[in-house]
Amino acid sequence: MKIIELVNGQIIEEYEILKEIKSMIMDNYINNKEFLNDDSSLYIKYKDGSSYYICGTQEDGIFKKTGIKTVIENNPETYGVYGKYKLTKVDNSESDNICTWLINN
C-alpha cells in the first residue's frame, strides 16, 4: 500500500494488491455490517459494469469478491482506493492546501 498526503492534510491509501483491499473490505464492511455508521462508506465498481455501495444501514447492489475494477473507501481518517480514481476539488478555495478534495472514479 502506498500512502499519499495531499497539501491540505487529507490522506489517500492506495492499495496496489487486490488481496489487500479484499481483506480490508471483508474486515471493515462485509463481516461487520452491524457496526457500520454513516461516517464511513465503501463503493466498488466491477468489470461487468455493476457496482456495490454500503454506508451505515444503506446498502445498494450485491457484493462480489471477483471482477473488482475500482474500490473507493471514505472514512473520517482517510480515503482507501484501488484501481483508477480521480481527485476533484469540491470547494471554491483558490488555495489547494485549504480546500477539500473528493475521490471519485
Image: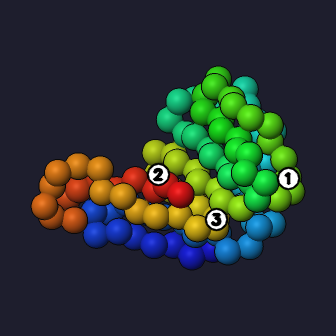
First reached walking from the N terminus: tag 2 or tag 1: 1
Q: Position of residue 4 (x, y in %)?
A: 45, 73
Q: Position of residue 32 (x, y in %)?
A: 75, 35
Which amino acid lies under the numbered mark 2 shown in the image of this protein? Glu
The label number, if any, that marks residue 77 in the structure image: 2
Tags 3 and 2 touching, CB below 8 Å: no
Nearer the observer, disc 2 or disc 1? 1
Q: Amino acid at mark 1?
A: Lys
Question: Which element carries disc 1, helix, strand or loop?
Answer: loop
Q: Quadrant of residue 89?
A: bottom left
Looking at the image, which residue is at 63% across and 46% down?
Answer: 43
**Outermost residue, front side:** 49
Percent coordinates x, y for residue 6 in the rendering:
35, 68
* Disc 2 crowd, CA 10 A, few/some/many (<14, 14-19, 20+): few
Residue 22, image quadrant? bottom right
Which three-letter amino acid code belongs to the residue tagged 3? Tyr
**Nearer-N-terminus badge (3/2):** 2
* Label 3 to label 2: alpha-carbon separation: 17 Å
Which residue matches tag 1? 65
Nearer to us: label 3 or label 2:
3
Marks 1 and 3, how far apart at CA = 14 Å
Residue designated by label 3: 82
